[in-house]
Structure formats: C-alpha cells, structure tokens
Amino acid sequence: NDMDSTSDSENEVVNLGLMAKDYESEEEVTSSNNDISISFDELQDAFNDLHKESFKLAKLVSSYKKSISNLENKISKLNNN
C-alpha cells in the first residue's frame, strides 16, 4: 500500500511537472504550431530531468509522511493521558 502511495505521488509529481512545462511553453507552441523542431535528445533530457526530480520529491513526500505519522502518534498519546 505504501508502494501505491509512492507510485501515486511520483505520478502526481510528473504530471505537475509536465503541466508546468506545458504552461510555460504554451505561448511558444501556439505561435509556432507549424515549426516544431524538438529533437529526441532534448525530449530525453527533459524526461530524465523530470524523472530525477520526481524521485527527489517522492523521497520528500515519504519523509513528510513519516513525520506526520510520528506527530499523529504523539498527539494520540497526549490525548490518551
């Protein structure tokens, strides 16, 4: 189940990155619809960058989940006293 959460988090991060990238380049794309000249290497580099960033963010999410769980446990203990 934790793996599903991590996978979902990674997918969300990738999707957000792609959405941001799309938003940034929207004007460029619309103004040059007939002049698309992105090479495979450029696409591969962009994918690799997003992939690396998604793993970094997935680790952060995992760390935050652990912190939240620890804090929830502390709150639960305080409420039981």
Image (tube, rainbow, N blue to C red):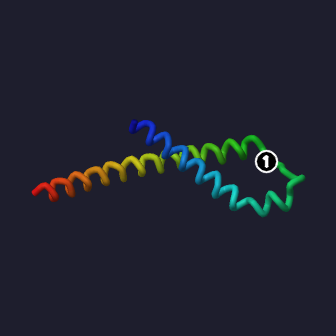
In the displayed structure image, the side of residue 27 where residue 46 appears, left or right? left
Q: Quadrant of the C terminus?
A: bottom left
| Crowd rating for badge 1 (residues with CA inside 10 Å; few <14, some 14–19, many 20+) | few
In the displayed structure image, the side of residue 27 where residue 61 appears, left or right? left
In the displayed structure image, the side of residue 44 where residue 39 appears, left or right? right
Quarter of the view holding residue 51: top right
When the figure is inspected, residue 32 is found, relative to residue 12, above or below; the finding is below
Q: What residue do we see at 35% from left, 50% from top? A: 65
Q: Nearer the viewer, residue 27 or 49?
A: 27
* Callout 1 secondary element: loop
Q: Residue furthest right?
A: 34
Q: What residue do we see at 86% from left, 58% from top? A: 32
Q: Residue furthest front?
A: 80
Q: What residue do we see at 63% from left, 58% from top? A: 20
Q: From the image, tell me which residue sits under label 1.
A: 38
Residue 46 in the image: state x and y as whole percent: 66, 48
Q: Nearer the viewer, residue 70 or 39?
A: 70
Residue 36 in the image: state x and y as whole percent: 84, 50
Q: Residue furthest left?
A: 81
In the displayed structure image, the side of residue 63 where residue 17 appears, left or right? right
Residue 53 in the image: state x and y as whole percent: 53, 49
Report the amino acid beneath label 1. Ile
Q: Nearer the viewer, residue 17 or 12?
A: 12
Residue 11 in the image: state x and y as whole percent: 55, 44
Q: Quadrant of the N terminus?
A: top left
Q: How many marks?
A: 1
